[in-house]
């Protein structure tokens, strides 16, 4: 039993070290970061955070990320819920082949789609927009969301549908009043994974934006000033980038717990 506790403690320490190091780096001076090895800053400064909060570039980058992540989650769920329902309730020739073909998009690296998306969006005049990035991320998120939700929906007996229709429920009323609450944990899990992918994805976000829709992950990769790399500034931006994910996990933790317990993941 003691060995298990020791292993668990070591595991959490290893998980905590990168985050701790990023936090203390964000409140150090660049001289201390580059010239000394300290476990705690000698002089705590918040200049890096003040620079982010007063910089239009950083503020717009965070806003751009939030905007296209929300768009992506909404589009993904609106497309995945009907698709997952169809796969879970109806059987047709080639349904298994189609279902697994959808998942093959997740196996391809994002760089494969960089050139075709760029050419297509230039043609459609939506290059460097929030919608362009959100739509590109749907290629990866929709198949995953369908796969997750299909697992949830398949676990709900079809007799519930039949009983509701016998009782005179329309499909819309049945879906939103009875079926939707039953799959709410699965929707929470899907929203979490969609947010996580879109928030941190870099290759497509960098290829499909220039200035108007540039997200924070792209701004993080160009944090170089006249004096070189601003390590403290990048660390502070990294800390602020982690916080939204932590808040989302905290507020939807109950749905996620049910989702992980009942679904595919």
Image (cartoon, grey):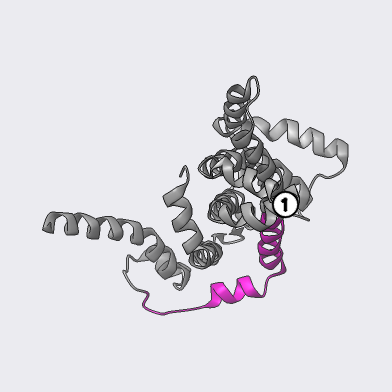
> Where's residue 144, x and y in %?
57, 40
> Where's residue 94, x and y in %?
63, 20
Q: Quadrant of the N terminus?
A: bottom left
Q: Is residue 113 above or below residue 18?
A: above
Residue at the front extreme, as displayed: 167
Q: Which residue is mark 1?
A: 169
In this rendered view, identify the residue nearer to me: 175 or 193: 175
Residue at the top extreme, as displayed: 93
The image quarter containing residue 22 is: bottom left
For mark 1, does the 10 Å Cα neighbourhood hold few (<14), some (14 to 19), or many (20 or more) residues?
some
Q: Is residue 235 above or below residue 99?
A: below
> Where's residue 132, x and y in %?
76, 46
Residue drawn at (36%, 78%), measured in percent from left and top? Answer: 42
- 44 vs 192, left or right, is left
In this rendered view, identify the residue nearer to me: 215 or 92: 92
Q: Is residue 21 visible?
A: yes
Magenta stretch encompasses residue 234 = no
Magenta stretch encompasses residue 54 = yes
- 190 vs 205, left or right, is left
Q: Which residues are magenta?
A: 41-70
> Where's residue 258, x and y in %?
46, 56
Residue drawn at (74%, 35%), measured in percent from left and top? Answer: 117
Residue drawn at (62%, 30%), measured in percent from left and top? Answer: 102
The image quarter containing residue 91 is: top right
Q: Secondary structure at mark 1?
A: loop
The number of callouts visible is 1
- 229 vs 94, left or right, is left
Magenta stretch, main secondary structure, is helix
In this rendered view, identify the residue nearer to me: 221 or 9: 9
Q: Is residue 221 visible?
A: no
Residue drawn at (66%, 52%), measured in percent from left and top? Answer: 73
């Amino acid at each position: 039993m003691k060995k298990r506790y020791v292993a668990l403690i070591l595991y959490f320490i290893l998980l905590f070290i990168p985050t701790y190091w990023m936090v203390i780096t964000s409140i150090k001076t660049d001289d201390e970061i580059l010239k000394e090895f300290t476990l705690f800053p000698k002089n705590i400064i918040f200049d890096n955070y003040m620079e982010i909060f007063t910089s239009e570039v950083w503020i717009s980058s965070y806003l751009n990320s939030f905007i296209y992540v929300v768009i992506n989650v909404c589009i993904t769920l609106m497309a995945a819920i009907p698709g997952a329902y169809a796969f879970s309730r109806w059987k047709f020739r080639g349904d298994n082949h189609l279902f697994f073909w959808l998942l093959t998009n997740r196996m391809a690296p994002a760089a494969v789609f960089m050139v075709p998306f760029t050419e297509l969006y230039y043609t459609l005049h939506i290059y460097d927009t929030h919608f362009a990035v959100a739509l590109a991320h749907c290629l990866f998120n929709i198949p995953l969301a369908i796969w997750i939700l299909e697992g949830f929906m398949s676990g709900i007996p079809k007799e519930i549908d039949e009983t509701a229709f016998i009782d005179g429920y329309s499909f819309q009323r049945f879906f939103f009043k009875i079926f939707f609450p039953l799959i709410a944990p699965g929707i929470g899990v899907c929203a979490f994974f969609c947010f996580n992918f879109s928030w941190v994805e870099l290759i497509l976000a960098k290829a499909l934006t220039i200035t108007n829709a540039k997200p924070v992950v792209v701004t993080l990769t160009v944090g170089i000033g006249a004096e070189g790399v601003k390590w403290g500034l990048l660390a502070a931006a990294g800390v602020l980038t982690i916080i939204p994910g932590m808040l989302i996990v905290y507020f939807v933790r109950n749905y996620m717990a049910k989702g992980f317990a009942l679904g595919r993941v």
